[in-house]
Image: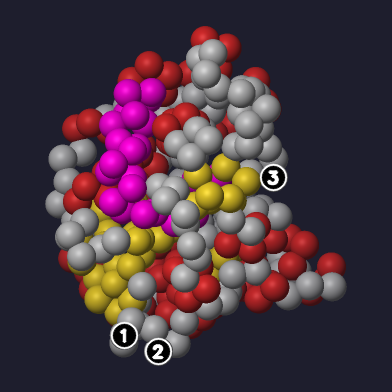
Amino acid sequence: MDLTLTFDAAYAAHAAVVMSTVAESNPGEALRYWLIADDVPAAARATLARVAGPNATVEYLTVDTSPVNLPKGNDPVMAYLSPAMYLRLLVPAALPEDVRRVLYLDCDTMCTNSLRPLFEVDMGGKPVGAVRDPFNRRLLDIGGIPGLSGYTDLDPYALYFNSGVLLIDVDRWKECEVTETSLDYLRRHAHESRYPDQDALNFAVYDNWLRLPHRWNDLMAWRREPEFGGKLTDSAIIHPAGPVKPWLPGFPKGARRDLYWQHRRRSGGMRPSVRR
């Protein structure tokens, strides 16, 4: 199974948690990681290789980052976002030719179940599989994606997905020019976007993405907390999106925070960012 994460040095410790949870939830699986990790030092890279597990390989992709030197957006609530969010757009073109399907994971996700069924999904020729965002459910929600009223070929009521987990058909992504279309959109609208990379991807693959069950990107995983009668393994990937993360003091006590810190301890001396 091929996976990718993109991050900068501030998020390296959190990327290690993601990879550690994947290893624990997928024992015996051969994993290949293709990382774009901006300014991540050698010691952190050694830790990432270790927590990835005995059946994993970790490779770093070399990319020209100049096309993604873009604004982060203008919403102060989303100020925690890193410009590294744009790096995911550069992954498919940088992958070796034998990688046909890759799973992108945000660095605030945690894997709680086997990923094998996801890699066996028939994507039906779609370049991207993703989960509908439960908070911004349509293109027009929360003011709409920037420029929506000017794009007459877009249905404002079309579904809108969260970009924190992306199942990518690499060949179809390239054929559909998803990177190029996303970057073109961002050059026009990044400065006014709330979720810049996410808005751009929803624009680029409009009416051409596979809707995945929410268990593959559970943005409401608080419902899986035991105090609410659930368990984290009822989902496969939990995603505490938003400004309050499991590594911050304001995150609620419970199974999600415990899971994060259990795997943080496994990464040893990597210090989590205090900025996010």
- Residue identifier under label 1: 55
Q: Does the segment drawn in magenta span residue 171?
A: yes
Q: Secondary structure under badge 2?
A: loop
In the image, residue 11 above or below residue 269:
above
| 166 w.r.t. 226: above or below | above
Seen at 48% across and 76% down, the residue is 116
Residue 49 appears in the figure: no
Query: In the structure shown, which secondary structural element does the residue marked by tag 3 occupy?
Result: loop
Mark 2: few/some/many CA within 10 Å (<14, 14-19, 20+)? few
The residue that label 3 is drawn on is 134
Give the residue type that dot 1 points to: Asn
Quadrant location of the N terminus in the rendered image: bottom left
Compared with residue 188, is residue 211 higher up or lower down, i.e. above or below?
Answer: below
Q: Nearer the viewer, residue 243 or 59?
A: 59
Q: Nearer the viewer, residue 201 or 70?
A: 201
How far, Cα to Cα, is label 2 from label 1?
7 Å
Residue nearest the observer in this picture, 267 or 153: 153
Q: Quadrant of residue 40?
A: bottom left
Amino acid beneath label 2: Gly
Residue closest to the eye, 246 or 229: 229
Q: Which residues are magenta?
A: 162-186
Q: Which amino acid lies under the numbered mark 3 shown in the image of this protein?
A: Pro
Query: Of helix, strand and loop, which one carries label 1?
Result: loop
Q: Are marks 2 and 1 in contact (CB under 8 Å)?
A: yes
